Amino acid sequence: MYTQAMDTMGKEGAAEAPKTLRSAEELALQVRFDERIDAGAFIEAKDWMPENYRKTLTRQISQHAHSEIVGMLPEGNWISRAPTLKRKAILLAKVQDEGGHGLYLYAAAETLGSSRDQLLDALHTGKAKYSSIFNYPTLTWADVGVIGWLVDGAAIMNQVPICRCSYAPYARAMVRICREESFHQRQGYDALLTMMRDGTDAQRAMVQDAVNRWWWPSIMMFGPPDDQSPNSAQSMRWGIKRISNDDLRQKFIDATVPQAEVLGVSLPDPDLKWNEARGHHDHGPIDWAEFWRVVGGDGPCNRDRLATRVRAWEDGAWVREAALAHARKQAERDAAAQGRAA
Ligand code: FAQ
């Protein structure tokens, strides 16, 4: 039940299976779609699209939405323990933003024809994936700062190119999300800077410990290496992905190393060094066995995260029922008023 390795929404047939086009009309639609993609045009929900394009987007956008709402949990644990009123207010707003991002993304996924209930059911039954990063524990307050700095930092690096994704409802949602993520990243960095500059030795050690624990999982967030990424080639052709997993990971590492220097923390990779010839930082080997273990449901917090989501869904049943009853009454009242006016 808790595996993330099972099939996800729309994965079946994601690799373009050879298929006989049903009619000249469909062939013309396919040609028109390909031309629009090649020209960099946006595809809207009402436009014709190949079934596998629809499935790939449903898979990616719903996984992204699940990541946002599961991503509320590690930091949510710290709202009641934030060290000051200011930090508490910031953290409350951040976690609330993440809920909002989940909602924009579920709405974008729904435009592709799956219902919110179907998408959430896939999460709750363990069929759908969410980002591996949220299966790690938040042990200290410094983890909250490091999530902002590294996890939101990685999320922005991955998400800015999605603002140019060929599917317009997803691209539009990402523009707003990226603006908010950028605030999230800065608040995390600011919290860490405060601890490093004005804190005690114990607080500085806490920051370093959190960086040591989150660094590798953060760079795994970008997904498997390009040569082991089954979805990348097709998603790049369709303009869903604009930059590859490895290239985004490299951009993130290059951007983060100088930030770590300003902060005064070390990154836990002895092989991390500037390579003048490449114009990039080299890094040590990534433990992909750990990544797949976590994606497969066996990370430190997978079971706990999913159980918490399922419990929240069940506890919220009365809210959904009340909202539906209210909407029904409202519709009845509107219909009666229209009847009187006619
Ligand atoms: N975790 O062939 P690829 C956030 C799966 S939001 C789990 O390379 P693709 C905000 C992948 O699904 C973070 N699974 O796949 C926040 C595929 O399996 P499938 C989420 C992963 O789709 C911050 C298989 O491995 N962001 O953090 C992961 O082309 C702080 C093979 O991989 C998004 O979702 C992973 N890390 O590329 C909230 C962004 N990586 O589905 C709270 C949108 C890969 O075929 C606090 N998504 N897999 O069974 C994407 O950009 C892409 O989907 C990738 C994966 C890059 C994640």
Image: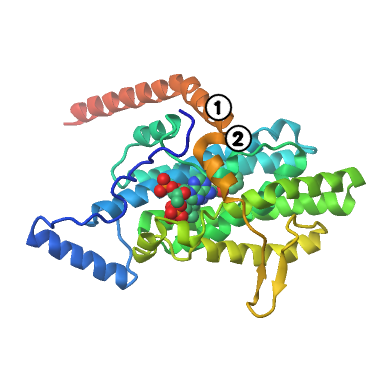
Residue 184 appears in the picture as rendered: no
Residue at 44 percent across and 21 percent down: it is 317
| Residue 40, position as x, y percentages in the image | 34, 70
Question: Between 328 and 334, which is closer to the camera in this rendering?
Answer: 328
First in sequence: mark 1 vs mark 2: 2
Residue name at image x 69 percent, y 79 percent: 276
Q: Is residue 316 visible?
A: yes
Q: Quadrant of residue 144?
A: top right
Q: Which disc is residue 308 wearing?
A: 1
Vertical placement of residue 223 versus 97, above or below: below
Q: How is the image coloured?
A: rainbow
Amino acid tagged 1:
Thr
Question: Answer yes or no: do the residues labelled 1 and 2 have beta carbons within 8 Å?
Answer: yes
Give the side of residue 44 with respect to residue 320, left or right.
Answer: left
Q: Which quadrant of the figure contains the N terminus?
A: top left
- Which residue sits furthest bottom? 277
In the depicted structure, whether residue 314 falls above or below residue 274: above
Amino acid of disc 2: Leu
